[in-house]
Image (cartoon, rainbow, N blue to C red):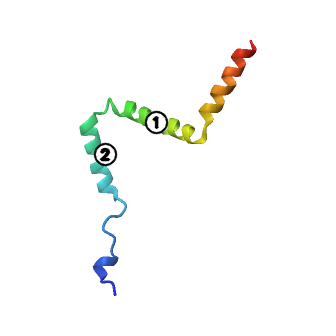
Amino acid sequence: MLSQAASIPLFGMPGLWEWIIIIGIILLLFGATKLPKLGKGLGEGIRNFKSGLTGEDDEKDETAGKDKEDK
């Protein structure tokens, strides 16, 4: 038989105040000027990861190489 304490999750989704604190700490660590660069780098990294999983870059490279050979 489980006790009531065991059925309560230890961690849940952060609430409003937790998100505000997390964003404040990130701003203090990186500064407001570097955040857009971090976001752009993170977006490019995710895009590269997804294209690596699907193999889209490989297909684009192959078709680009064939176009150059035809000319």
Q: Is residue 39 left or right of residue 10?
A: right
> Helix or strand or loop: what does disc 2 sit on?
helix
In the image, residue 60 sits, relative to residue 23, either above or below, namely above
Q: Amino acid at mark 1?
A: Gly
Dot 1 and dot 2 residues touching (CB under 8 Å):
no
Instruction: Pinpoint residue 61: horizontal percent, then vertical percent.
Output: 63, 26
In the image, residue 15 sits, relative to residue 66, either above or below, namely below
Q: Quadrant of the C terminus?
A: top right
Instruction: Pinpoint residue 23: horizontal percent, then vertical percent.
Output: 31, 45
Going 61% across and 37% down the picture, which residue do you hit? 55
Please identify the residue farthest to the top as the structure is shown: 71
Going 69% across and 16% down the picture, which residue do you hit? 68
Q: CA distance from mark 1 to mark 2?
A: 21 Å
Q: Quadrant of the N terminus?
A: bottom left
Please identify the residue farthest to the right as the structure is shown: 70
Residue assigned mark 1: 45
- Pick whichever, 57 or 5, lies toward us: 57
Mark number for residue 23? 2
Going 38% across and 34% down the picture, which residue do you hit? 38
Going 67% across and 22% down the picture, which residue do you hit? 64
Quadrant of the rendered image containing residue 54: top right
Instruction: Pinpoint residue 6: horizontal percent, then vertical percent.
Output: 31, 77
- Pick whichever, 4 or 14, lies toward us: 4
| Label 1: few (<14), some (14–19) or many (≥20) C-alpha neighbours in 10 Å | few
> Helix or strand or loop: what does disc 1 sit on?
helix
Point out the tag, 1 or 2, that comes first from the N-terminus: 2
Mark number for residue 64? none
Q: Is residue 11 left or right of residue 47?
A: left
Q: Is residue 66 left or right of residue 45?
A: right
In the image, residue 64 sits, relative to residue 6, either above or below, namely above
Q: Amino acid at mark 2?
A: Ile
